[in-house]
Amino acid sequence: MKPILYSFRRCPYAMRARLAIASAGIEVELREVVLRDKPQEMLEASPKGTVPVLITETGVIEESREIMEWALVQNDPEGLCDMPAEGEDWIAQIEGPFKTALDRYKYETRYEGVEPLAEREAAAAILRQVDGQLRERLWLYGDRPSFADLATITFVRQFAMVDRAWFEGEDWTGVQGWLERFLASERFAQIMLKYAKWQPGDDPVVFPAISLN
């Protein structure tokens, strides 16, 4: 039986898990979740109730970063894990202060006393740190993507989508080009294929549907 991946198409955490699985070429059974109506089978496997959740023969993996590592330890044909040490620092910034600011910018009504434009600027300041290097190369650390690119760019996409006109009007052509190359890529098209909500008894959906290699 293939591993089972509970996922939600637009969730940046689920997206990065699918990116790694697709790169590794490991087939899983994808179960698309509607977050307001989570399947009992997922909740029994992972009571935390958030996606992604991967069920393997040896256990349940509940964190997207760990799912990425699970996939790429088995097969890393693109050499995604071959990145410089500063890649970990970049991931930590995006998962930490950037995501905190992004949430307060995008979902300001969920937080008391939040200034959304100040939060936007806090997130933007982090992106500007890599704009210079992205003006000189295609990806963060060279002419091919690394683990750091795929682990963080789905959050940059989410940030850009809040106010696309503002994002495109900023003077950070390196960051803009980085995101646009990702959005125009075959890998992005592959992970964003639409699937119907999974229900018990449905025929299995195999992901990835096509191979990148």
Image (tube, helix red, strand yellow):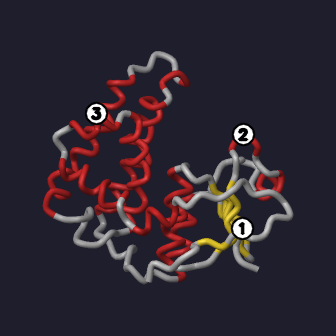
Disc 2 from disc 3: Cα separation: 30 Å
Q: Which of marks 3 and 1 is in front?
A: 3
Q: Which mark is residue 36?
A: 2
Q: If you read the primary sequence from the N terminus, does the residue marked by circle 1 or circle 2 appear first?
A: 2
Residue drawn where x is 26% and y is 64% of the image: 139
12 left or right of 156? right
Q: Would you name the residue on which mark 1 appears?
A: 55
Q: Residue 166 carries which label?
A: 3
Q: Nearer the viewer, mark 1 or mark 2?
A: 2
Q: Which of the 4 image quarters holds residue 208? A: bottom right
Mark 2 lies on a secondary structure that is: helix
Q: How crowded is mark 2: few (under 14 residues within 10 Å), some or many (20 or more)?
A: few
Q: If you read the primary sequence from the N terminus, does the residue marked by circle 2 or circle 3 appear first?
A: 2
Q: Where is residue 108 in the image (x, y as percent from the top left)?
A: 48, 24
Q: Where is residue 159 in the image (x, y as percent from the top left)?
A: 39, 41
- Location of the C terminus by quadrant is bottom left
Which kind of residue does numbered mark 1 sit on? Ile
Mark 1 lies on a secondary structure that is: strand
The image shows residue 209, relative to residue 33, as above or below, that is: below
Q: If you read the primary sequence from the N terminus, does the residue marked by circle 3 or circle 1 appear first?
A: 1
